[in-house]
Image: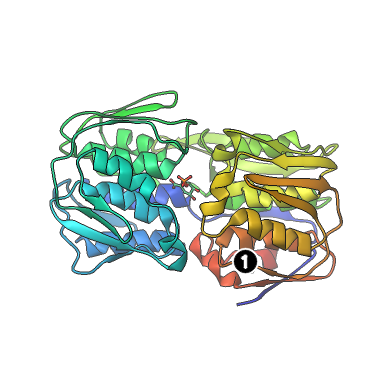
Amino acid sequence: MIATVRRARRLDGDISVPGDKSISHRALILGSIADGESRVRGLSTGADVRSTAGCMRALGVEIDDSVVRGVGMRGLRASADALDCGNSGTTMRLLAGLLSAQKFASELRGDESLTTRPMDRVVAPLREMGARASWPPLEVGGHVPLHGIEYRPSVPSAQVKSAVLLAGLFAVSPTVVLEPVATRNHTELMLAAMGADVKVEGRLVEIRPADRLSPLDIEIPGDLSGATFWLVVSGLVHGSHARIRDVGINPTRTAVVDLIRSCGLAIAVNSVRSESGEPVGDLEVGPASALRPLSVSGGMAAEMIDELPVLAVLASQLPGTSRISGAAELRVKESDRIAAMAEGLAAMGADITALDDGWVINGPRPLEGARVHSHRDHRVAMALAVAGLLADGTTEIEDADCVEISYPGFFDQLESLC
Ligand code: S3P
C-alpha cells in the first residue's frame, strides 16, 4: 500500500493510542506460564503481538479475547512446527529465553527482516547458562536444568535482559544481569507483580528460581512510542491542543518526553496513576515556546531507541544543529533506521547527515512532499508520515501497510485527526 499524506491542520481534542507493545508481549508470555487464568485488557492488536499470541497457542496455551489460560511453569508443550515470530524481535528473543529452559527443543523463525537481525546476543548468555542454543536458524531447549549466571551484556537491550531473566526463572541458582544502561523494566515489574523473587538495584537485576507465578489482572496502558508521533505533530503544528489519554509513563520509557520538552515543546503529564505496577497518565500538548535544537548521546539513545526516527523529523524543524549519536543499534532494527530516515528526510528537503551511530540535522528546513520508502519498517513509515504532515505538497510512503506491526489503523487515525 502507498499512503498519501498532506500538511496537517491544527490538532484539537482527544487521541487514543494502541496498547503498549512491550507490555503486551510480556503479558502473553508470562500469563501463559502462570498458574491459572490471567485477565489482560487493552492488549496491542499489532501484528508483532499477534505473533507472540500465535507462538504461545502453538505451545499449547489457550488465549481468547482478554483471557490467557496459563498452563503453569512446567505446562508448555512442544510445537509440532517451527514457531513463527513474524517481524517481531521481542517475540523471538523473549521466547528464546523461555524456551531454552524447557525439556523440549524449539525452532524459532521469522520474516526476511527478522532472519537477518542479530540473535547471537541471546544465544551466548543462554549457552553460558547451560542451555542448548544455536543460530541461525534459532534452535533452543532440550537440555535442562540451567544454572544461574552473572551476565553483563555489551549492548543495552531489554530483550536480551528479559531473555536471560526468563531463563533464570527456571534455573537452579540465582541469575544476575548488569546492564551498561538501564533499559525498560516491564519484565521485572510484571514478574514481581506475579510473585517472582526479583531484586533491582540501579542497572542490576537479580532473579531467583521460581516454582509458580500468580496470574495477572492488567489493563495494558497506551503505548508511549505510538503517542510520540502525535506529541511531535501537535507540538509543532501551531494552534494545536491535543490530549492523549491512558499512556504508559514508566520512567524507563519517558526520557523521550523530557527530551521533547527540552526543545521547547510543552507537554504536561496529568492524572498519574498505577496499573499493575506500571505508571499511567494523560499527556497534554500545549503551545510551544522558543524552539531549541536537540541533543542525544551515549546512554540516552538506549532510553528512547524506538522514538529516534520521529525525533529526527522533529530535529529537522528545530533551529540550529541537532545531533543524535550513540544509536548504532538503529542499524539492526526492523530496517537500517539510520539510512532509511536519512534517505527519506533528505528526499523531503531536510539537511541531514547520517553518522555510523546517528545523524546530524540542521534546521529548520521547510519540508517538501516526496515519494519515500518505509523499507517495510513500521517506525520509519510513521516517522515519515509525521514529516509528510509538516511538509508542503503531497508525501507518498511506499509499503506503508507495515504500520500494522505496532499501530493498526494509524493512517485512518491520521486522516481523521489531521
Ligand atoms: C523492546 C526492547 C527494545 C525496543 C523494542 C521493544 C522490548 O529492543 O527497540 O521495540 O519490548 O523489550 P532492544 O531490547 O533490542 O533494544
Estimate the x, y position of residue 389 in percent, counting from the top left: 76, 61
The kind of residue tagged 1 is Ser
Q: Quadrant of residue 370?
A: bottom right
Q: Is residue 303 visible?
A: yes
Estimate the x, y position of residue 365 in percent, counting from the top left: 86, 53
Q: Which residue is mark 1?
A: 374
What is the total number of numbered labels drawn onto the structure image? 1
Q: Tell whether 156 sits left or right of 409.
A: left
Q: Quadrant of residue 137?
A: bottom left
Q: Residue at x 62, y 39 (%)?
A: 256
Front position in the image: 46 or 167: 167
Image quarter hosting the C terminus: bottom right
Q: Is residue 242 visible?
A: no
Tag 1: Cα neighbours inside 10 Å, few (<14), some, or many (≥20)? many
Q: Residue at x 54, y 46 (%)?
A: 329
Q: Is residue 265 shown above or below 337? A: above
Residue positioned most to the bottom = 1
Ligand 1 has an atom within 8 Å of the beta carbon of the residue at disc 1: no
Estimate the x, y position of residue 265 in percent, counting from the top left: 76, 40
Q: Tell whether 393 sits left or right of 23.
A: right
Q: Tell whether 362 sits left or right of 415.
A: right
* Circle 1 SS class: loop
Q: Is residue 136 shown above or below 172? A: below
Image quarter hosting the N terminus: bottom right
Q: Residue at x 44, y 61 (%)?
A: 116
Estimate the x, y position of residue 134 in percent, counting from the top left: 27, 53
Q: Is residue 129 shown above or below 178? A: below
